[in-house]
Amino acid sequence: MRLLSVRVQDFWCIEDSTEFPIADVTCLVGKNESGKTALLKALHKLKPDEASKEQFVPSRDYPKRKWRPDVAPPTNPPAITTTWQLDDADVADLEKKFGVGVIADRPFTLTKGFDNDRQFSIKSDEEAAVKHLIGDLGLSEEEKTVSGGFEIKSIQKAVAEAKEVGVSSQKLLDTFKQRFPNGVNHAIIQAVAERVPTFLYFDNYLSLPGTVSVDDIVSRKAQNKLTDRDRVFLALLSLAGTTIEKVHSAETYEEFNSKLRAVSNQVTDQIFKYWTQNKHLDVDIRLDHARPKDQPPFNSGWIFRTRIDNTRHRADTNFDERSSGFVWFFSFLVWFYQLKQLYGNNLIILLDEPGLSLHARAQGDLLRYIREQLRPYYQVIYTTHSPFMIDNDDFLSARTVEDVVKKEKKKDEEIEHLLGTKVSADVLSTDPDTVSPLQRALDYEITQTLFIGKHTLLVEGPSDLLYLKWFSGQLEKAKKPGLDYRWNICAVRGIDRIPGFVSLFRGNHLHIAAVVDVQAGHKAKIENAKKILEDKHLLTLDGYAGQNEADIEDVLGREFYAALVNKTYDLRGKEKLPATKPAGVSVPDRVVEEVKAHFAVLPPRFEEFDHMKPAEHLFQGGDEGSKLPGFEDTLGRMEKLIGDLNALMS
């Protein structure tokens, strides 16, 4: 079962998040106090790991601007609305129980409101369930005919009208009522509800204790009063395949020492596979008698001590005395290593600001752990405002979160309308502060790629990168050469930065080419770039667009680009960009400037034009762009550009 989308309404600071899609690993990016935690908390209440965390409480959870103590919050709209998709295993199990074809449609919705009642909307086929039941009862063909068909109402009618009620027909009715007392759909909903994944919420407050009193933890375990820190420690032992009782009950010193050494070795191997900040560390877990002058409860009985040996400095320290980043990372990996054993695969993980105390490199280690150890088994949703916690290999799975305030001018007064937290999949077009981590992530990835990429292609902006990638894919689908895979495309944000980038990385013996726009006043800039690049390695877009001034959008062609803009912004009727330039009207040569002028006279209800948005729409839309008018001509021009770039690859 897979979570497809989420919408949160009337919860904490969220009035309506709008529906947003969920990927295998979804990153929620936003400023502090933008509502990221509220989104995870609301989702957690759908089906949490502990029933005590399940209830929506109006006085605590309903938006304070709208809450009235003497009035119950409305149940519609629900606080959380989710869309899911049944997978092959789900359908196979449901059909085995209820009959082949009983699931009429795999997607379904699950909602929960302040009445704390989960509501499912699932399309099922009663006829398939009746056929399955008839098969189970082994009715003959004659008995099937007498039963009145495969709808339960028809069977009930046939039995009611029959002069003599057949034993088989009556048995069918009785069995149906027994199996489906509230109908087929209700029974299917109950079965699906059991299969809905559990949501596990994790934040910064769970950490492994470096020192543990055996007597205390055994006592709390017997009373079923284990704390979160206790559970993390037991998970540490479980990671090494043992328990506190097994280690403590060893009968000889050699057995006892071997078990502790095995635990230490297992933990060291697991943790330092992902902690790359310091490879000169070993985990040493010890069990010894308490010392009478230690702080209670560590002054009596047996004490477990987790210590970290530094083999370079030949020193060891208590785990609690390590850096907060190391303690967090260690605790995180220990706990999540046990998830499969504790919950199986049926889990969705919610991580609130993971790795805040980690260095940038360590945050990269954490992302690698999420990709390699969590993603294959679970869907993961996490929040961040760190550029180093954004996966550049899965950039478009990020969702921006911002607390939106709409400003309206009335006469000389500016009025603010609070719209609350909004979530968007348009990762490159929103509030500058919100997308700052995304931009920094792109900048970092660009410089890293320039440093390690032998063949580097510089473009002026992210939209150029998306267009080149998308049209390269379309050429390959048409059995034509796409862009040579060895090119690393980097957006440098302007022709002015090309000489600086080339100079900075010239010592790395990189093969660098550039594709640049041509605009009035750019002649000197283009000449400067030509001087620093190899011969014929600066490609200007005027030659591919067939006009003196040209952006990448002009290479796409006016017909195709106008249709793409109309599709992206849903322009209709008089608001649409015409397929050809209006006759007798002064229109800029560059199509982007023409579109900007067009948007300037549109009614206020239309948002401002952002030239990144059509590129993102095209890239995210799969093959839909190939249906736009002018596509074939555009593909021909892009084929020429890509072919010239490939020709530079000797």
Image (spheres, rainbow, N blue to C red):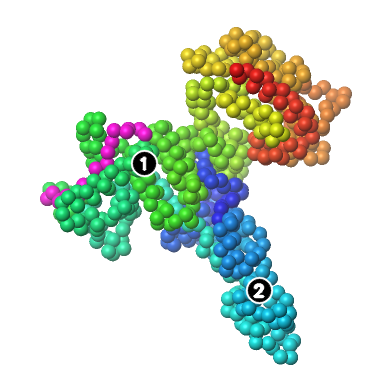
- Residue 522 location (% of width, % of height): 67, 13
Count the marks: 2
Q: Nearer the viewer, residue 351 or 513?
A: 513
- Residue 312 forms part of the magenta stretch: no
Q: Position of residue 226 (x, y in %)?
A: 31, 58
Q: Is residue 409 left or right of residue 222?
A: right
Q: Which residues are magenta?
A: 276-292
User: In percent of the image, x 37 and y 39: which residue is there?
Assistant: 273
Residue that numbered label 2 is attached to: 130
**What residue is rendered at 62% in x and 26% in y?**
484
Amino acid identity at mark 1: Phe
Residue 141: x, y in percent? 71, 79
Screen quadrant of the N terminus: bottom right
Residue 584 appearing in the image: yes
Q: Quadrant of residue 577?
A: top right
Image disc number at residue 329? 1
| Residue at 61%, 38% in the rendered image | 426
Task: Please tell me how crowded label 2 is: few (under 14), some (14-19), or many (20+) other residues with Cα within 10 Å.
Answer: many
Locate residue 119, reporting x and y percent: 58, 63
Q: At label 2, which amino acid type do we have?
A: Val
Whether label 2 touches label 1, CB < 8 Å: no
Residue 343 versus residue 64: which sits nearer the camera? 343
User: Going by the image, does 42 lie left or right of 227?
Assistant: right
Residue 277 is covered by the magenta coloring: yes
Image quadrant for the C terminus? top right
- Left/right of residue 504 with respect to residue 549 in the rendered view: left
Q: Is residue 389 above or below residue 6?
A: above
* CA separation in Å, label 2 and label 1: 54 Å
Q: Residues within 10 Å of mark 1 (few under 14, many from 20)?
A: many
Camera-side residue of 82 and 99: 99
